[in-house]
Amino acid sequence: MYPVGIHSGNHRAISLVGEVDRTMLRAVIKRSSRTEGADDSIRHRLIPDDTVKSMHQRLEGIKDEISEVLKEEKLEKEVRPNTL
């Protein structure tokens, strides 16, 4: 499972799961439904292939930009003193 992000307003997270990890996802869903007092529920949505392909093309188009930002963030982290 690949966590994608958390929306701080309602504390929801999404994870992307490929076909290979479907067995693990089923186990997570089963275990989650047994948790007493849990108000959260796990929902799943299927993303159409054309949507995935379109997003992949968009990401490929900004791949170099993403790499630059990641390098800058890594450099900033190395320069910044530990504040923990």
Image (spheres, rainbow, N blue to C red):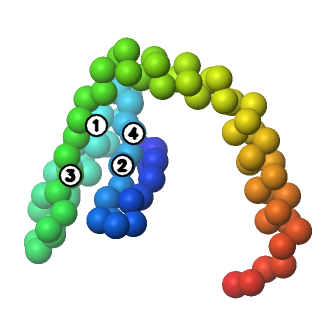
Q: Specify the quadrant that holds the C terminus.
A: bottom right
Badge 2 crowding class, 10 Å Cα cut-off, few under 14, some 14 to 19, many 20 or more, is: some
Q: Identify which amino acid the numbered label 3 is placed on.
A: Ile
Badge 4 crowding class, 10 Å Cα cut-off, few under 14, some 14 to 19, many 20 or more, is: some
The foreground one among 39 and 53 is 53
Taking the image as shown, residue 48 lies to the left or right of residue 34, namely right
Q: Point out the residue furthest to the right here.
A: 79
Q: Nearer the viewer, mark 3 or mark 1?
A: 3
List x then y, in percent, for residue 50.
37, 15
List x then y, in percent, for residue 61.
65, 23
Q: Earlier in the sequence, mark 2 or mark 3?
A: 2
Q: Is residue 55 above or below residue 31?
A: above
Give the residue at x 42% y 23%.
52
Callout 2 touching callout 4 (CB < 8 Å)? yes
Label ID, residue 41: none
Label ID, residue 42: 3
Q: Identify which amino acid the numbered label 1 is placed on.
A: Thr
The image quadrant of residue 59 is: top right
Label ID, residue 14: 2
C-alpha distance separating marks 2 and 3: 10 Å
Q: Identify which amino acid the numbered label 2 is placed on.
A: Ile
List x then y, in percent, for residue 2.
45, 44
